[in-house]
């Protein structure tokens, strides 16, 4: 059994519509889920339990369920970057880095998604990615470049080249 704690502001996602999201994860993942004390208990066989855990974590990290469900496909993976491990733990600096990754009205995040092929979520002090292996590799490099202070345009140019296989 695996226990996944839910952020308080994401519990409603799992409770609404009489637990419809939980039932859908159960069906797609061939697992049993139970909401208990702000956590999701997951019971399943081997890999199915792990994949269901990844889907729950993805939803907890801000992904829409339909994007998180991509993880049921063997080609897709979840990657989590803890910004506190990568950059200063100073709240003001963390906010600046997150703003750089998201951009005005989410433009930078959307552009990164379009160019890398990976889905990107900036939630709390984490950046989460869902995508195929090569897409994740490109997206992580783009994020690293932005965190190092490279311009958005140079990161977008890099991602364009990656996508074209240059």
Image: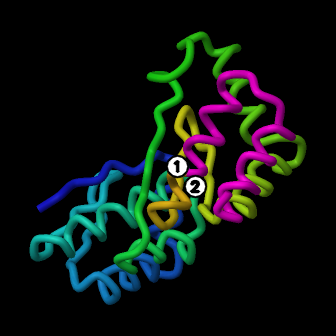
> Magenta stretch: residue 147 in it?
yes
Residue with the mark numbered 2: 62
Residue 149's place in the image compared with 42, above or below, is above
> Magenta stretch: residue 67 in it?
no
Circle 2: element type: loop
Residue with the mark numbered 1: 128
Q: State the image quarter where residue 135 is shown.
A: bottom right
In this view of the protein, which residue sits in the foreground, 116 or 5?
116
Q: State the image quarter where residue 76 is shown.
A: bottom left
In this view of the protein, which residue sits in the foreground, 131 or 24?
131
Residue range corresponding to the magenta coloring = 138-166
The residue shown at (29%, 69%) is 51
Within-10-Å neighbours for mark 2: few <14, some 14–19, many 20+: some
Give coordinates of residue 78: x percent, y percent: 42, 58
In this rendering, which labeled residue sits more in front, label 2 or label 1? 1
Give coordinates of residue 14: x percent, y percent: 45, 68
- Which secondary structure is most common in the magenta stretch? helix
As measured in the structure, the alpha-carbon distance from the residue carrying label 2 to the one carrying label 1 is 8 Å
Within-10-Å neighbours for mark 1: few <14, some 14–19, many 20+: many
Disc 2, disc 1: CB below 8 Å? yes
Which mark sits nearer the N-terminus, 2 or 1? Answer: 2
Task: Please give left or right for residue 83 compared with residue 106 in the image.
Answer: left
């Amino acid at each position: 059994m695996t226990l996944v704690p839910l952020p308080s502001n994401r519990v409603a996602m799992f409770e609404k519509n009489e637990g419809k999201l939980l039932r859908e994860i159960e069906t797609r993942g061939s697992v049993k889920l139970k909401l208990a004390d702000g956590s999701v208990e997951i019971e399943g066989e081997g890999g199915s339990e792990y994949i269901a855990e990844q889907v729950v974590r993805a939803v907890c990290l801000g992904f829409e369920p339909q994007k998180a469900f991509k993880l049921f496909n063997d080609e897709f993976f979840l990657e989590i970057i803890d910004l506190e491990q990568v950059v200063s733990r100073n709240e003001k600096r963390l906010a600046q880095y997150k703003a750089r990754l998201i951009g005005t009205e989410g433009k930078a995040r959307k552009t990164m998604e379009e160019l890398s092929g990976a889905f990107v979520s900036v939630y709390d002090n984490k950046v989460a990615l869902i995508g195929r292996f090569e897409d994740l590799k490109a997206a992580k490099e783009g994020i690293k470049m932005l965190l190092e202070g490279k311009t958005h345009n140079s990161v977008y140019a890099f991602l364009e080249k990656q996508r074209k296989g240059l």
